[in-house]
């Protein structure tokens, strides 16, 4: 094979892997919209917040402890969002909830800046930055790991929404919140679970993108670059997030 063909193939493979990493961010949007029909403008800020929190905790409790602490923090964030933002806006138009997520995004960015400053920070998760070669094509180890993680997350979430009682309940809330409430599905708990899962996805996305780009405030802009993935894959399709990333 010619060098030009190998170079083009390498660019194509690299682009596909990076696209799948963008789908990690898109998954957060899809989860919130799927369960509450709300476009969560704060997903990028949540990704940034999770990455900054992880970097902030590591010097004190190590990587494993920091990961646990960040996951707990995102659960607390989900509880706070449900109680402070979503609960007062029940039965309000979706635009009101969308505007609330814009405010949440600005709050998380400002709060992160106050706690951890604005200087870029490095994040090392132990994956070598050097690419490896397969049939003359150089592939980034980090991008490959990110693509595998994204694929596993998608499979896990598909199983969760289609095979578990909680997942089926969340789908019912998305289809008709009032009917779901009438048959005994607790709306508040459903929203909390959804935001918790979206927060955990933000943790994974923050770790991988923070390792790739450095943990800095421009990390929240990755969410904007994930919007084409949403448009192609659909706002309610979890597999579509991966398909959109590949395209």
Image (cartoon, helix red, strand yellow):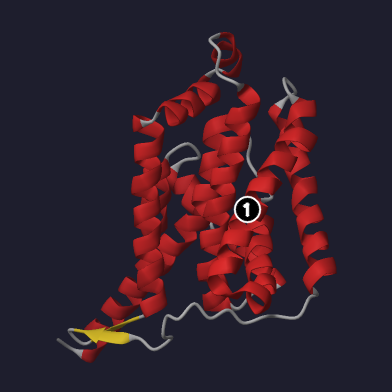
Q: Nearer the viewer, residue 203 or 96?
A: 203
Q: As displayed, is residue 168 above or below residue 203?
A: above
Does 69 sit left or right of 106 as displayed? left
Viewer can see residue 10: yes
Does 227 sit left or right of 117 as displayed? left
Does 28 sit left or right of 128 as displayed? right
Q: As displayed, is residue 168 above or below residue 127?
A: above
Viewer can see residue 224: no
Residue under the image location 42 percent in, 80 percent down: 127
Task: Return the residue found at the far right.
Answer: 114
Residue 202: x and y in percent read: 57, 56
Location of mark 1 (residue): 72
Residue under the image location 53 percent in, 57 percent down: 226
Look at the numbered disc 1 and give the secondary structure of its residue. helix
Residue 189: x and y in percent read: 61, 29
Residue under the image location 54 percent in, 15 percent down: 180
Q: Hey, which quadrant is residue 217 in on the image?
A: bottom right
Residue 204: x and y in percent read: 51, 61
Give the quarter of the figure containing the N terminus.
bottom left
Q: Nearer the viewer, residue 32 or 164?
A: 164
Decide: few, some or many residues near mark 1? Use Cα within 10 Å; few <14, some 14-19, many ≥20: some
Residue 64: x and y in percent read: 53, 69
Q: Hey, which quadrant is residue 69 in on the image?
A: bottom right
Give the quarter of the figure containing the C terminus.
bottom left
Q: Nearer the viewer, residue 99 or 8?
A: 99
């Amino acid at each position: 094979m010619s060098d030009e063909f190998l170079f083009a193939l390498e660019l194509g493979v690299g682009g596909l892997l990076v696209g799948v990493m963008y789908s990690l961010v898109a998954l957060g949007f899809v989860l919130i919209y799927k369960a509450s029909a709300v476009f969560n403008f704060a997903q990028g800020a949540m990704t940034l917040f999770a990455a900054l929190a992880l970097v902030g905790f590591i010097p004190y409790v190590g990587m494993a402890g920091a990961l646990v602490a960040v996951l707990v923090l995102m659960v607390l964030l989900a509880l706070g969002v449900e109680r402070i933002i979503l609960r007062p806006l029940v039965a309000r138009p979706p635009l009101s909830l969308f505007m609330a997520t814009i405010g949440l995004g600005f709050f998380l960015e400002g709060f992160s800046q106050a706690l951890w400053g604005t200087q870029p920070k490095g994040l090392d998760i132990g994956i070598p930055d050097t690419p490896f070669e397969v049939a003359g094509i150089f592939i980034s180890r980090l991008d490959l790991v990110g693509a595998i993680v994204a694929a596993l997350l998608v499979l896990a979430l598909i199983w969760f929404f289609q095979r578990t009682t909680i997942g089926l309940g969340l789908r019912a809330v998305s289809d008709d919140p009032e009917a779901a409430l009438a048959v005994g599905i607790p709306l508040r708990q459903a929203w909390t679970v959804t935001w918790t899962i979206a927060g955990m996805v933000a943790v994974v996305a923050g770790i991988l993108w923070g390792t790739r780009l450095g943990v800095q405030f421009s990390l929240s802009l990755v969410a904007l670059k994930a919007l084409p993935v949403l448009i192609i894959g659909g706002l309610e399709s979890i597999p579509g997030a991966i398909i959109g990333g590949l395209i």
